[in-house]
Image (cartoon, helix red, strand yellow):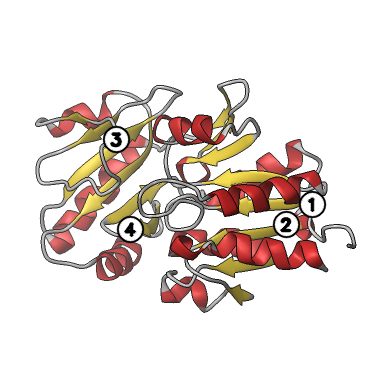
Amino acid sequence: MTSFPYKLVATDLDGTLLRSDGTVSSRTRDALAAATAAGAAHIVVTGRAVPWTRHILDDLGYDGLAVCGQGAQVYHAGEHRLLTSVTLDRRLAGVALAKLEAEVGPLALAASRDGLDGEVLVGPGYRVHEGPLPSVPFENPDDVWAAPLNKVYIQHPELDDDTLTRVAREVVGGLVDVVMAGAGVVEILPLGLSKATGLSLAARRLGLRAADTIAFGDMPNDIPMFAWATHGVAMANAHDELKAVAQEITASNEDDGIAVVLEELLRR
């Protein structure tokens, strides 16, 4: 067997590393362990903020760096320590939301507060799709802006995710970034922030580069990560926008798509 061709394996969580029941198969765990034994680092890169990611990493026995909050946070899982964090300009975000609502009507909102224990605030009508994760309901929109935030989630009662994302980018794309991260998950982020910016910071801490990296993902928010990495692998269940820019398409997250690729690379 020749040496593993990449020094860094970057994996999204939901729809990629995780199966629909929130677990990681033994086959995928073994493939990642074999890749790291062959000299590669593994970095989880997720849209989830640290409080919604930490329990998954602990369950995996993961003690490396993780990029959370769409690139806003670099988290050291082994030390349970936040290394870097980028926050949303709340005044600018408020202006952007007002402009967007003037265009499309009222939105349902949620927001992710900054920090290791930052709460996710969920407003009236907002549907949480990530399962039974901790959140705090709010009624008064002013509560959203009371403390630093990493991002704001938006939903519309009629527009689907693709349409809401497109319209939001057209209306407020010069003020904030807008990404679709999953079903019912459209997010407003600091302008210029992406998984690629967070991953590049984490990689630099390890002395690694884009040219060393293979990345796995399933949603449009993974597009910047694919553009940064030397090789992007989309899952079979991936959004068409991500498949269009991927160098490779593997099996679905339910069928060990990450393991399929890593096992082949390890056999070479």
- Local packing at callout 2 (Cα closer than 10 Å; few below 14, some 14-19, many 20+) is many
Kindly indicate whether the residue at mark 4 contacts the one at mark 1 (C-beta within 8 angstroms).
Answer: no
* Disc 2 and disc 3 in contact, CB within 8 angstroms: no
| Residue that label 2 marks | 213
Cα–Cα span, label 2 and label 1: 6 Å
| Distance Cα–Cα, label 1 vs label 3 | 33 Å
Q: Nearer the viewer, residue 112 or 18?
A: 18
* Residue type pointed to by label 3: Leu
Give above or below for 166 relative to 125: below
Q: Residue furthest right?
A: 2
- In the displayed orientation, state which residue is furthest to the bottom: 244
Front one among 102 and 60: 60
On the image, numbered disc 3 is attached to which residue?
133
Image spot of residue 219 (x, y percent): 44, 63
Q: Which residue is mark 4?
A: 172
* Image quadrant containing the C terminus: bottom right
